[in-house]
Amino acid sequence: MSVLETSRAVLAIDEMLQSLFKWDSIHFHGVGKMKLANGSGQVEHHKGPGFMNIDVASPTYLYEQQLAFFPLLPGLLRLGNAAYTILDPSNSLLPASTVYLIAGVIFTNSCFVFSVRSLFRLSMKLQASNQSLATVACILYCLSPAGIFLSAIYTESPFNCFTLQALNCYSDLLQNVTVAFPKRLQTAATTVMYLVLATAIRSNGAATAGLLWGWYALMGLGAERRESGTFSAISIVRLALRAFASLILLLLSISPLIAFQYWATRAMCVGETPRPWCSDTIPVPYAFVQKFYWGNGLFAYWTLNNAGYFVLASGMLLWCFYSVYSYGREVVSSFRITIGIDDAHTTQDHGPANLALTPIVLLHAFLTISCLVSMHVQILTRLVSGLPTLYWAAAKWCLNEDSRGGREVLNEGRFKMVLLCVMGYAAAGAVLFGAFLPPA
C-alpha cells in the first residue's frame, strides 16, 4: 500500500471514529493525551475554561472542570497509545490522536461484550435460573436506549462491566453462606476489586459499594436474631465485627474516589488564591465541580427552561419507576427477613437470591430519584443503563406463563412494542449525539 493510500485509509478511519468523539468523550480524550508545559503549581480560574497549571509529573488534568472525569479511562487511553508506540515509535502510520480514538473504542466495546455475559450470569443466579428471562434481558440490554453511550468513548460500558461483575461476586458471597471462610474471603476480595475498578472510572461506583456493603452489614441482624432469638452480648460483638468488616470493605471499594479527591486537593490548594472548596473541612472537589460547572444540586435543574429535558426523560423515568415497583414485594419481604422480623422459611419470597436482589433494586431507586431531583435528568438513560432490574422488569412483562407446559413463552406483541420503543429511543439518541445535541 502506497503512502497516499495509507494516508487516505487513516483519514477514513479517523473520520469514522470522530462520529463517536462527542461530549464527554472529548474530556476523556483530552485528559488522556495532554501534557502540561510548566510546574508552577498555581491555579488560575475563570468561569469559562478554568485553567489550572499543575506539576508535569502528576496526572494530566488541565482544567478544573475535568475533575468530574475520573482517571482510569484516560489512563487506559494513554496506556493504549504507549503500547502502540512500541510498534510505531514515531507514529508514522497512525497519528497519536487516532490511536487514542481506536484504543478508546476497542476498550469500551470490549467491556460492553463482557458486560452482556455478566448480565446473563447474574440473571440466571437471581432470577431462578430463568433462561428465557435472562435471554430477553440481554437482548434488551444490547439494544439499550443508551446504546450510543455504550459504544462511544464513555465510561458507561466499562462501568457496567465492572459493576455487573461485582454483583455476580456479591451474590455468590450472600448465597454461599456455608462455604469455608477462606473461600468467602476470596469472594469478598474479588467483589472489592471490581468495585474499586468501577469507582475508579465513575463516581457512582461509591453509591453501589455503599448499598452493597451497608446491606451486608444489615443482614447480620436477621442472622443473629434467627440463631439466638435475642441479642446477647456475644451477638452484639458479632454484629459490631460484621459492621466493622463491612466498613473496611466499603472504604477499600471507594479508595479510588478518596485518593483522587486527596490528589486534587494537594495539587490545587496551593498558591495565594486557592479554590473555594479548599477551605472545606473535608474538601471534595468533585462535588464543587458538579455544582459550579454543571449546575447540579437539589432541584437546581427544575426550571422552566429545562422542562423539555424532563419530557425527553419521561419515558425512562416511567420505565425506572415500573422496574422498582415490580420488585417492591420481594424487597419488602427480604428486608423483613434481613432484620429478623420474618423467617425465610415462612415467606413466599425468600432465599439468598432475593437477599442479593434487594440492594440492586434499592440502588435503582436511589439513582432514579437522585437523577430526578439533583442532576441533569436527561442523563438518566445512561446513568441506569447497567442496572439489571431495568431489563429484568421489561423481560418479565414480555413473558407469559404457558398453562400447558408450565414454562414461560414470549408474548410477541409486548416484545415487539418494547423493542420498538427501545430501538427508537436508541436511534434518536445516536442521531442527537452525532449532532452534538442532548441527551448526553
Image: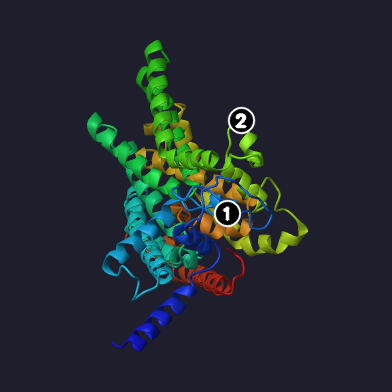
Secondary structure of residue under mark 2: loop
- Residue 262 visible, this angle: yes
User: Looking at the picture, how far across and down is residue 296, in whole percent?
Assistant: 65, 50
Q: Is residue 316 left or right of residue 403?
A: right
Q: Is residue 388 left or right of residue 377?
A: left
Secondary element at image label 1 = loop
What residue appears at the point 51 percent right and 48 percent down from the top-left corner? 39
Q: Which residue is mark 1?
A: 63
Q: Position of residue 235 (x, y in %)?
A: 39, 16
**Residue at the farthest right position:** 304
Point out which mark residue 123 bears: none
Question: Disc 2 vs disc 1: which is toward the camera?
Answer: 1
Residue under the point 46% across and 28% down:
339
Marks 2 and 1 sit apart, C-alpha to C-alpha, by: 23 Å
The residue sitting at the top extreme is 233
Q: Which mark is residue 281?
A: 2
